[in-house]
Amino acid sequence: MSGQSIAEQVDTFNGGFNEQIGPVLADVFAQEQAALTAAGVPDGAVREGDTVPDAALVRTDGSAVALADVLGGRPAVLVFYRGAWCPYCNIALQTYQRDLLPALADRGVELVAISPQTPEGSEQAVANGGLEFTVLSDPSNALVRGLGILTEPSGEARQAHTQLGFDVADSNADATGDIPFPTVLVVDGDRVVRFADVHVDYTTRTEVPTILEAVERLRPA
């Protein structure tokens, strides 16, 4: 799939996935996505010019770490994702590993992915995608809540998850169904947001060229 956009990979995935789960469950998820799109990005969601607060996060080995220490005053791309259980998240993270990480490394920019999962869930995301960038847990969604990007699956979607043998609460560190809207932030060395892209439809993600354009704007003219 090298060279394919996230949207192209999602289109391919959706064809097989919808056939696998059948029209009833596929319609449940389609209705959820339509409702999220209609509601739009929350008024209080993070935007350019905001400062990302420091936060107590957890590494894949279970050790605590402060976001400020992870970034070390360097510019960064922060990726908020729902969890290793989410196929759209895995597509995005694997694409960022392949197409974004090398370009960021050349520019001295950190890449950090954050979810509300347990450390084991974060480790699963790493294993799923062969990820070589930092993957952290925001175990109570404290950072996500502070950024105004907290949501949860609809009741119908959670019932559909149950029929598929899954419950998001089982993966989250706080045993709730709370998850972030998939979001990419580009922050400078002071954690000031220079680019914010919040996706209420979780099947869509920020494409690599868009992120790199934002990163380039961090550089002095």
Image: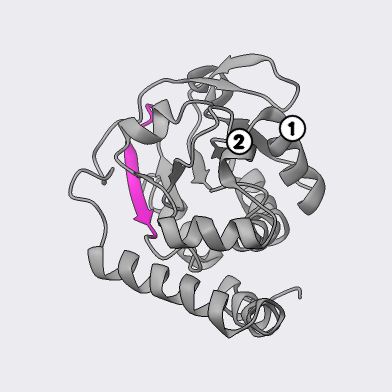
Amino acid type, residue under disc 2 in the picture: Gln
Residue 202 forms part of the magenta stretch: no
Q: Could you tell me which residue is drawn at 45 percent across and 62 percent down?
A: 156
Question: Residue 12: which quarter of the image?
Answer: bottom right
CA distance for labels 2 and 1? 8 Å
> Height in image: 26 above or below 187?
below
Query: Measured from the top left, where is residue 158 in percent x and y?
Result: 51, 55
> Height in image: 76 above or below 70?
below
The label shown at residue 209 is none
**Residue 111 visible in image:** no
The label shown at residue 120 is 1
Q: Which residues are magenta?
A: 189-199
Q: Could you tell me which residue is drawn at 42 percent across and 56 percent down?
A: 155
Query: Measured from the top left, where is residue 100 in percent x and y?
Result: 63, 56
Is 124 positioned to the left or the right of 170 in the image?
Answer: right
**Residue 2 visible in image:** yes
Is 157 positioned to the left or the right of 49 in the image?
Answer: right
Q: Depth check: 185 or 161 in front?
A: 161
Is 137 positioned to the left or the right of 84 in the image?
Answer: left
Question: Residue 22: which quarter of the image?
Answer: bottom right
Residue 190 forms part of the magenta stretch: yes
Q: Could you tell me which residue is drawn at 56 percent across and 39 percent down?
A: 169
Q: Depth check: 182 or 67 in front?
A: 182
Query: Measured from the top left, where is residue 211 in percent x and y?
Result: 48, 58
Verify CB contact (< 8 Å) between mark 2 and mark 1.
yes
The label shown at residue 117 is 2
Amino acid type, residue under disc 1 in the picture: Glu
Instruction: Say what secondary structure mark 1 lies in.
Output: helix
> Height in image: 120 above or below 43?
above
